[in-house]
Every structure is written in C-alpha cells, then in structure tokens.
Amino acid sequence: MSKSKRLLLIIAPVCIIAGVALTLPISGHSPDQPGVLAELAGPAAAEAAEPSGQKYTCGMHPFIITDAPGLCPICNMELTPLKPTGGASAAKPSGERKIKYWVAPMDPTFIRNEPGKSPMGMDLVPVYEDEAASGSIISIDPVTSQNMGVRVAPVTRKDLSRTIRTVGLIGYEEPKQFSVNSKIDGWVERLHVNETGQFVKKGAPLLEIYSPALVSAQEEFLLARNNSLALAASPFPTIADGAKRLLDASRRRLKLWDISDRQIARLEKTGEVAKSLTLYAPYDGVVTTKMVREGMFIKSGMELMALSDISKVWVYADIYEYEMPWVKLGQKAKIILPYVGSQPIESTVSYIYPFVEPKTRTVKARFDIRNPDFALKPDMYVNVRLESEPVKNALTVPTEAILHSGEKQTVFVALGGGKFEPRQVRTGVQNEAGDIEIVQGVLEGEQVVISAQFMLDSESKLREAIQKMLEPKSPSAGQQVHSDAGASKNPDDLFSNDSKQTASDESLDDLFKDDAKSKVKSKK
C-alpha cells in the first residue's frame, strides 16, 4: 500500500465524523439529545455524551454562564458552580400537594386562607407549599444565612396606637378680635387709653374726637327738636308729622356716627352742643394695636385701635402629613407649658384646617382653651401630646421588614429549610414602637425577614434573571415535526447530502473556470 493511500485512510474517518457533527443542527437535534452520534456510537457512548446539567458562573460577572469549569473571560477568575434555583422550573413533588393560601390572579397582595372571590370578581387561585405566587422562591443554606445576619419575626395581631408629639402656637380667638375706628374726619382731642397691652372693659371711654361735621350735626338736631316742639300743636297734622320725621332723621344721623343714645339724650335734654365725640370700647379685651396719638388728624374708616379678648385662646398644633391618619376631631390632647412646674392642660381637637401650610408642609389642628388667669399668652410656644385612638386587632410586622421600591412594598416570607419567598404587600398605619399594619399580602403566623433582606432581594432578582436565560423554550409544532423528520433520517442519507453539496461546489468551480476562459477569448 502506497503512502498516499495510507494518508487517505487516516483522513477519511476524521472527515466523516466532522460531517456528522456539522449536520446535527440541520437534522433538528438539540445539544442535550443523543442524536445520530449516540446511535452510531452505541448506548455506552450515549450515556457518556449526556450532560450532567451543572452550570458554572463568575462571582464578579454573574451573566457569564458556562457548561464546564474554567476561567472568566473578563476578569480571569475561577468559575464557581451555579446552584439550582428553587423557582417554578424546579421539579415538583409527586402525590397530593398541600395548599398554602389562595391569591387573586390580578393582585398578588390579596391573600386569603380559603377560596373565594377577589375585589375584581375573579376566583382566587391556590398557591401550594412547594411554589410561590411570584415563582421566585430562593434557597440559601443555613451557614450563608447566618453569615448574612438573616433574622425573622412573626406576623402578629395587635392594637396599634400612637402618641403624636408636636409643638403648638397660642393665638387669639378670632371671633373676639375687634377694630376701633371713626366714621367721621376730625382731630383726636384726648386719649383715655394710651398704652398697648392695656386691659379695657366694655363701655369704657377710649378717645375723644373733634369734628366740625359732628358739631353741625348736633346743631341740626337741636333745630329739628325745636321745630318739632313748635309744630306739635299745629292744626295741620301733616305739618306736625313732617317736623317729627325731620327730628327722627337727625337723631338717626348722630347714631350712624357712633354717638350713643345716652349722649343724644343729654344733648336733647340740655340743648348744649358738645365739641368732641367720645368713642367707647365695644367689648372687653386688651389693646393689641394702637395707631393713634393725641392731636392726630384722622380720616373716616381709619383703624385707631385693635382689641382682643384673651379670656379664651386658640392653640395651633402642627401635624405632619404622614401623621394625619391618627388625628380626628374630638381627640384628647395635653397642652404642656414650656416652663418648669406647669400642669398639663386637658383639651380636645376642635377643628382640623382643610389645607396644608406650604412652608412647613403641615396641617394645623386647633384646640380651644379657657384662659381665666391669662397664663397662656398669645404667640407663646407649647408642647402638644395627642393620644390617638388605637387600631384594633391589626395584622402587623416590624417596619424594618418592609422593602420600599417606588410604588411597591415587599417583604420576604421565610418558608423554612432555607427558603424565602418575596411577596408584595399593602401597608397601613405605623405606630411609634416600630410596628406597621399590613392590609394585604401576608397571613398571621408567617415569618418575615427583618434584616439582610436587601441581599435577599438582589439574590432573588439575580436568580430570576438567570432562570429566564437558562429556561429552554418549548418548540412549536412545526419545529417538532422538523426535528422528528431529521431524527428519522438514515446516516447514509446525511453522507449522501454531503456528497451532493460537494458535487454542487465542484460544479460552481467549473462554472467560474468556464467564465474566466470566455473572458480571455473575448479579449483576444
């Protein structure tokens, strides 16, 4: 046998094996099926070619996933075995499965212990103990959980209450604030009350005003009085009535200028015109503002003094927006004065203002407090303690168990055996002891993670992403028929196709050669 024939016998088997390997994708076989090679090599080779299913990944680049151990192509670190996820693709135990709870198909936070209807009218679907509603249960061995510092706490029912501690500002009682002004132009002849902060009684004189118009009005009143007396015995009733009407009009004019009935009666009795008009205090109170001095010219409508009654004051307490669910009308509170030794003052919420202060972002709650000894001074700061009404039998978890991510709140439920399930919840009110109400999402007695849940959250998202990448897509009907057709082919047909392809390639070479020859002839 010549040397060339021996070389041909060595190369031929290698080419045949390479051709079969290249035709595997064409025949529709997946990498994890024995295929034609297994049929050719026998059962032993098929068992050796079957993959173990172990994946390897890089600790620094988790998106690098391979079927065999080795080095990371990015950081050159040793690849580590990838633990199987406990997700929805895991094998489910055979036999009867136990239902853990029932959940709404469109709202994963709506959980019940028994079947029923969701708020949208849909039937609740069961969730079994070996699966999660979100399909992303993660498993962590006990040593790793201890190193991460994972701690759990039970979901319990308790009464939630909260004591709101805030600051209050004492103000005047608005309906008991009065303005003293003049309805005529004139000069201030005398000030009877000349100090800001001075207490006045109702009916006490405040100031005296000289006005030429007032003097003319008094003289006109005296003329009308004399005319009415002279025409009272007239034989013509219309003339007597006209004189009386003129007198009434003059008297009404004086009253409209704030001249009291007592002053008008004295003027009518004595017939003496008073040079000045005296203004009297309309109510009891303290002078909070004084804008007039003796000898000053004033115009009609000008505010001269401001009086306020402080026998009853208002306390405005600032309530932050997140504390508003705890504040109600009629709620009891204690007002504590800032100085030492003061006794708390009991009061109730009388009004909650329907707007938010734009600068402080707070809502004002008002308390009406009697102040007989004037111990409470306007604009004084006080401490306010609001005792809220408890929320009875609320389902609660510690506040540190809640993961806030935008519009969603998530907790991790410990299922036991190192398994944790992320679950969306809806939260309610929160007390000052660190407990928060769970409206929907968990059941009483379940265990929730209260530390290291951020690491569990990242782990669950990572495993979910890896599971989506590793999960094989189910072939369609057309692909399955094509795969079956390719699998039923004879190996001889594969080689015949290869030979046909080679023949077609040779014919193409001949075509190009003929084309080149024709071009040369045309040039000649």
Image (cartoon, rainbow, N blue to C red):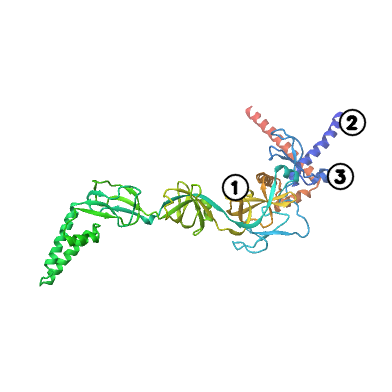
Q: Does 190 sit left or right of 507 as displayed?
A: left
Q: Amino acid at mark 3?
A: Ala
Q: Which quarter shows the C terminus?
A: top right
Q: CA distance from mark 3 to mark 2?
A: 35 Å
Q: Earlier in the sequence, mark 1 or mark 2?
A: 2
Q: Which quarter shows the N terminus?
A: top right
Q: Residue furthest top?
A: 524
Q: Earlier in the sequence, mark 1 or mark 3?
A: 3
Q: Position of residue 509 (x, y in %)?
A: 71, 34
Q: Position of residue 387 (x, y in %)?
A: 54, 55
Instruction: Please say whether residue 368 is visible from this viewpoint.
Output: yes
Q: CA distance from mark 1 to mark 2?
A: 79 Å
Circle nearer the viewer, 3 or 2: 3
Q: Position of residue 315 (x, y in %)?
A: 45, 53
Q: Earlier in the sequence, mark 3 or mark 2?
A: 2
Q: Does 212 sit left or right of 417 as displayed?
A: left
Task: Find numbered disc 1 in the image and state the secondary structure of the residue it sits on.
Answer: strand
Task: Find numbered disc 3 in the image and state the secondary structure of the residue it sits on.
Answer: helix
**Which dot marks residue 1?**
2
Q: Amino acid at mark 2?
A: Met
Q: Give the labeled residue for mark 3.
A: 44
Circle nearer the viewer, 1 or 3: 1
Q: Give the labeled residue for mark 1.
A: 405
> In front: 245, or 5?
245
Looking at the image, which residue is at 66% across and 46% down?
Answer: 453
Q: CA distance from mark 1 to mark 3?
A: 54 Å
Q: Badge 1: few (under 14), some or many (20 or more) residues near its Cα, within 10 Å?
A: few
Q: Badge 2: few (under 14), some or many (20 or more) residues near its Cα, within 10 Å?
A: few
> In front: 127, or 357?
357
